[in-house]
Image (cartoon, rainbow, N blue to C red):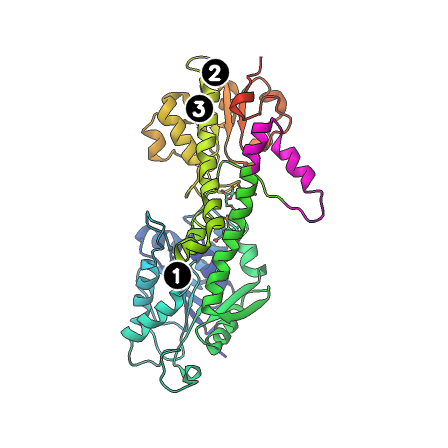
């Protein structure tokens, strides 16, 4: 086995998963090259800095870059292990787009040699790793590719190994979970899985479990669909509770005292690039058998529209021209990631309707996204919001917002979509029970 210090690793895609993964591998002493298509990302990393916000990532990257263990480039180089961590978006009809994965595989094919391992980490539809394998076989007929050998059982004599190992880390805890979480490693063949396993054992403390590539691909989609369905249940409950005039958070807190009940939290919808996206990969693959997963997606997306209507109804009741603060734009608490964010969608819809009356408080943004600027919304801090805004729409449960005491918001109309202010007298969000503080 190659020693840590001799191991050469290429990570393709230096985003929220690729960069932390590259840095963690570099910390073991391996020589890591991060490859990205964006020059500014490459330059930022090579100067020891980071282009994304993640707890402790800046210190780790500056350390491994200074030591020479991590370098970034737009050009690929020879390596022992290639890790693909590029995006897998979907099209308007929810068809997954694995174009970036296949492009990464094409790039790897230019430098691939016998003995190398390719690992796909991007969330992918079932069968993608086999497509990577087929592409490599086509581009590199000189190499014996696993699963492409004629003799029975010859898959174990392939020149290279190809495996799928999904990332499972939670933004905000990425560096901890990269090490501590269990990993599911699916090989094109059992030998491929074992080769990938030796790689992950270099830096993962959690259990590493091997399986087939297809099972590992479906496992990843299953994890995120499970969470989406459970959040949809909470969001559906929030609508029913509004109709009944009951506080949904109290009901959930009480129901969760049952030993076998564990309901998640309602919110303004589900955001991020994973849970709002991945369940569609399952629905697209088998529409006839996925009514529950599809409905959960629709319930969660529908909750965002519901919140827009509630917030608009609340603002309509405020004195004419009174400013209103949208608290948060990120897709969840304490991060700077606005991708697929329901908060951003709500704030943009409100700004489209109420224009300059809409003020945004987002401690994780220096400037507003163009869609909000174009609609005359302005970025202010929480103190100014408390001083100047008659209404507040809580869209993200950032710690900063949680810490605002009742005395500073008691006289405001509040739509609290995250349940962070249980003591707020006017936080009821049902239009029929919406009252302003007198
Ligand atoms: N949300 C709720 N209510 C909840 C929990 C979450 O409304 O009770 C919302 C959040 O506000 C956010 C969205 O759901 O908008 C997703 O947040 P999240 O914290 O549930 O998940 P992500 O997208 O940050 O990370 C998920 C994780 N998957 C699971 O927990 C099964 C993570 O482990 C994955 O690695 C990640 O997706 C991924 O990359 O796939």
Q: Kindly report which numbered mark, 3 or 2, lies closer to the viewer in this rendering.
A: 3
Query: Residue under circle 2?
Result: 318
Look at the picture and state if 302 lies above or below 163.
above
So how many labels did they put on this image?
A: 3
Q: Residue 265 in the image: x percent, y percent?
A: 58, 40
The answer to whether residue 91 is left or right of residue 161 is left
Q: Are marks 3 and 2 in contact (CB under 8 Å)?
A: no
Sequence order check: which comes first, mark 1 or mark 3? Answer: 1
Question: Is residue 238 shown in magenta?
Answer: yes
Secondary structure at numbered mark 2: loop
The magenta segment is 237-262
Give the quadrant of the C terminus.
top right
Kindly report the secondary structure that dominates the magenta region of the rendered protein: helix
Compared across the picture, whether 417 is left or right of 280 comes to: right
How far apart in space, not on screen, are marks 1 and 3 (Cα)? 49 Å
Please report whichever mark, 1 or 2, sits nearer to the chain's N-terminal start. Answer: 1
The answer to whether the residues at label 1 and label 2 have Cβ atoms under 8 Å apart is no
Tell me if label 1 and label 3 are in contact, CB under 8 Å: no
Q: Position of residue 435 (x, y in %)?
A: 55, 18
**Can you tell me whether the CB of the residue at mark 2 lies under 8 Å from the nearest atom of ligand 1?**
no
């Amino acid at each position: 086995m190659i020693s840590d210090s001799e191991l050469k690793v290429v990570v393709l895609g230096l985003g929220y998963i690729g960069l932390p993964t590259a840095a963690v591998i570099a910390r073991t002493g391996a020589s890591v090259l991060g490859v990205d298509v964006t020059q500014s990302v490459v330059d930022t990393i090579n100067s020891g800095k980071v282009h994304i916000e993640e707890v402790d990532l800046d210190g780790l990257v500056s350390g491994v870059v200074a030591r020479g263990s991590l370098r970034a480039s737009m050009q690929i180089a020879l390596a022992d292990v290639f890790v693909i961590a590029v995006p897998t978006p979907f099209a308007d009809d929810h068809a997954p787009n694995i174009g970036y994965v296949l492009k990464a595989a094409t790039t790897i094919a230019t430098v691939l040699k016998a003995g190398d391992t390719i690992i796909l980490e991007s969330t992918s539809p079932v069968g993608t790793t086999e497509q990577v394998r087929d592409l490599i076989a086509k581009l590199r007929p000189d190499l014996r590719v696993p699963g492409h050998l004629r003799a029975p059982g010859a898959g174990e004599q392939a020149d290279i190994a190809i495996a799928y190992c999904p990332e499972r880390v939670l933004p905000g805890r990425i560096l901890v979970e990269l090490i501590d979480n269990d990993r599911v490693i699916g090989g094109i063949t059992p030998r491929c899985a074992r080769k990938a396993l030796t790689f992950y054992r270099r830096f993962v403390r959690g259990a590493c479990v091997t399986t087939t590539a297809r099972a590992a691909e479906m496992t990843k989609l299953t994890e995120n669909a499970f969470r989406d369905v459970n959040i949809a249940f909470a969001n559906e409950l929030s609508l029913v509770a509004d109709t009944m005039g009951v506080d949904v958070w109290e009901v959930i807190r009480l129901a969760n005292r049952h030993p076998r009940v564990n309901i998640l939290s309602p919110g303004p919808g589900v955001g991020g690039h994973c849970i709002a996206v991945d369940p569609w990969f399952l629905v697209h693959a088998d529409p006839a058998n996925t009514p529950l997963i599809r409905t959960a997606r629709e319930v969660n997306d529908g909750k965002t529209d519901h919140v827009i209507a509630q917030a608009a109804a609340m603002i309509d009741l405020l004195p004419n021209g009174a400013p209103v603060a949208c608290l948060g734009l990120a897709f969840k608490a304490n991060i700077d990631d606005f991708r697929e964010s329901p908060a951003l969608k709500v704030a943009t819809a409100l700004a489209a309707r109420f224009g300059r009356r809409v003020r945004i408080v987002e401690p994780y943004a220096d400037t507003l996204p163009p869609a909000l600027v174009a609609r005359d919304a302005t970025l202010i801090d929480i103190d100014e919001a408390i001083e100047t805004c008659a209404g507040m729409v809580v869209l993200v449960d950032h710690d900063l917002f949680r810490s605002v005491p009742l005395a500073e918001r008691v006289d405001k109309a509040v739509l609290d979509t995250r349940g962070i202010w249980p003591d707020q007298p006017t936080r009821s969000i049902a239009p029929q029970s919406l009252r302003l503080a007198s």
